[in-house]
Image (cartoon, rainbow, N blue to C red):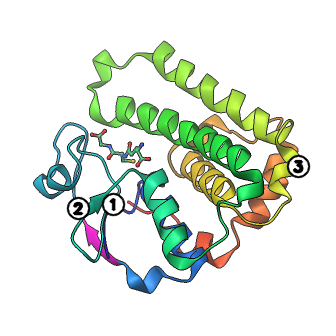
């Protein structure tokens, strides 16, 4: 399998961390690509018409995306237990919530990095950050019990989402008022599949 990737993307990291947790990281060849929302690399467009990464090219040459589909594909392929039947709707909902943290974090990054300073819109970025804070608070309180269970796809997504906030938006401090989530994350981030996939530029 080949993974079209960039080392800074939290969605790509989610796929890589999933593969590592499943013990199949060596079955994937990384295909690094330079691409942005303003300048999509042709190999990304060829794999995914929306121009987004990650995209996985399977051994029979089929391109699959997005990160949620790829992670589930890898879990099936490896016979993993990251999407347990007994908790499937909780896991999928929390994976979606973690992905929304990534979406909002990436939107803020694009605003800051791709738009000229004079047209950046602070209220828009603050509104994105508000989505992040409401979601981290939900994990910190309502969904706290879920985090103490066995590793699943939602936990991996959440770990990668919080890692991205530290990587790009550390100054905004998602940790404030989230002591339970911080304690969980500090431990989770030490797992090999997380430490070995930490984001870089
Ligand atoms: N829903 C997608 C989101 C992927 C995504 O937004 N990737 C970003 C990089 S972190 C991207 O490729 N952005 C390029 C663009 O927006 O055109 C997934 O889960 O894979």
Mark 1 CB near ligand 1 (8 Å cut): yes
Reply yes or no: does residue 27 show up in magenta.
no
The first of marks 3 and 2 along the sequence is 2
Q: Return the x and y of residue 31 as percentages of the image width and height.
A: 26, 71
Q: Return the x and y of residue 35 as percentages of the image width and height.
A: 22, 51
On the image, numbered disc 3 is attached to which residue? Answer: 145
Q: Return the x and y of residue 174 as percentages of the image width and height.
A: 69, 39
Local SS, label 3: helix
Which mark's residue is nearer the viewer, 3 or 2?
Answer: 3
Q: Is residue 21 above or below residue 95?
A: below
The first of marks 1 and 2 along the sequence is 1
Q: Residue at x 65, y 51 (%)?
A: 158
On the image, numbered disc 1 is attached to which residue? Answer: 6
The tag on residue 33 is 2
Compare residues 194 and 179 and report the one nearer the observer: 194
Q: Is residue 75 above or below residue 154?
A: below
């Amino acid at each position: 399998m080949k993974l079209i990737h960039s080392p800074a993307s939290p969605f790509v990291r989610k796929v890589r961390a999933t593969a590592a947790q499943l013990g199949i990281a060596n079955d994937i060849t990384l295909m690094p690509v330079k691409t942005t929302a303003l300048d999509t690399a042709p190999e990304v467009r060829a794999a995914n018409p929306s121009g987004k990464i990650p995209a996985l090219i399977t051994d029979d040459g089929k391109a699959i995306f997005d990160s949620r589909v790829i992670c589930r594909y890898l879990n099936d392929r490896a016979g993993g237990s990251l999407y347990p039947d007994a908790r499937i709707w909780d896991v999928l909902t929390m994976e979606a919530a973690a992905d929304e943290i990534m979406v909002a974090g990436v939107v803020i990054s694009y605003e800051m990095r791709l738009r000229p300073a004079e047209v950046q819109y602070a209220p828009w970025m603050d509104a994105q950050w508000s989505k992040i804070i409401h979601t981290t608070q939900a994990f910190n309180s309502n969904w706290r019990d879920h985090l103490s269970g066995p590793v699943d796809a939602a936990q991996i997504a959440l770990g990668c989402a919080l890692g991205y906030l530290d990587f790009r938006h550390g100054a905004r401090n998602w940790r404030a008022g989230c002591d339970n989530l911080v304690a969980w994350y500090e431990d989770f981030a030490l797992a090999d599949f997380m430490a070995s996939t930490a984001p870089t530029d």
